[in-house]
Image (cartoon, helix red, strand yellow):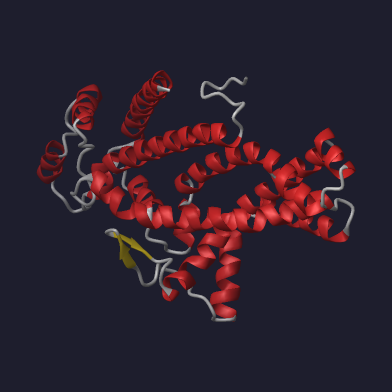
Amino acid sequence: MTAYLLRRGGQTLLTLLVMSILVFVGVYLVGNPVDVMISATATPQERAELIVRMGLDQPVWVQYWHFLKGALSGDLGNSFLYNRPALGLIFERMPATLELAFSALFLGLVFGIPLGVIAGLRPSKPESRGIMAFSILGFSLPTFWVGLMMILLFAVKLDILPASGRGETIDVLGVPLSIFTADGLSHIFLPALNLALFKISLVIRLTRAGVSEALQSEYVRFARAKGVSEWRIVFLHVLKNTLIPLITVVGLELGALIAFAVVTETIFSWPGMGKLIIDAITTLDRPVILAYLMITVLMFTVINLIVDLTYTLVDPRVKIDGGSE
């Protein structure tokens, strides 16, 4: 276990290093953030002073070396736009993004697994065909369009749900959360459902495929021959054997929900990391872009590690190094 964790830690550090180099050079080549931030009426002297103050007068390799030295001590630099530590800005917005992502994942599992089981148990029934047609729509419809239609229907036409914002929050262990207030739940429902639609469709198809495959297995036929009830077969035999592929995808998709909730957060004005990274990209705010991407890579790594460790709990035959007994 120790060797495995050390190996994964080394892979994470290498990934962070390569990613930071690519992003740093890429942002450097795209343009000068001073051109975006400084007023058009600024004098050449004011422009030169700002460039020196931001450290942009030095060669790119010198700038990266200063960034790397700071990163090793936990300092990813100050935001060019807000003049505050980039990590502090990310951590301020992170609870909102994590809350939205976990809410979307919850909806994906709550709706996706039952619908997938129904579609797998009765593949030729009209309800199963309707479920699969819904999953196709979930894959096909653009997230931004669905979000706009939700706002138009539920916020504008019916006026039953708010169109933007996070609503009322309460502090839970020092973290502001909105899911524990009625106002917060009404604000998070639409963005979470919009973010979850693709995941619901994915879980439906994975569950349906797993159920269909498990129903043809010998152990299910043997259980039926012994007179085991159909519901017991489904819950104890069929669903259990669909968990490993489901855990794999759900784990990866959680990382994707966190990293790529940008569109949903922008449409619904959700105050998370997505809105922050959009502003950072617009202004070429290099420290915030780097901090966001490094935190995202780190979260992906941690989530994948948890998924791998969960394998051993679900199926003891799976070894921690990826092999099997």
Where residue 265 appears, x then y in whole percent?
45, 58
The N terminus: image quadrant: top left
Horizontal side of 128 relative to 135 (left or right) equals right
- Which residue occupies 17% across, 27% down? 58
**Rendered view: 135 above or below 185:** above
Q: How many marks?
A: 0
Residue 163 makes an appearance in the image: no
Q: Quadrant of residue 159?
A: bottom right
Horizontal side of 307 relative to 209 (left or right) equals left
Along the line of sight, the residue nearer the viewer: 100 or 309: 309
Where residue 315 appears, x then y in whole percent?
61, 33
Residue 47 makes an appearance in the image: yes
Q: Quadrant of residue 184?
A: bottom left
The C terminus: image quadrant: top right
**Rendered view: 26 above or below 225:** above
Along the line of sight, the residue nearer the viewer: 192 or 250: 250
Horizontal side of 61 relative to 188 (left or right) equals left
Horizontal side of 76 relative to 220 (left or right) equals left
- Which residue occupies 71% across, 46% down? 236
Where residue 110 appears, x then y in whole percent?
62, 58
**Rendered view: 134 above or below 62:** below
Where residue 213 appears, x then y in whole percent?
80, 38
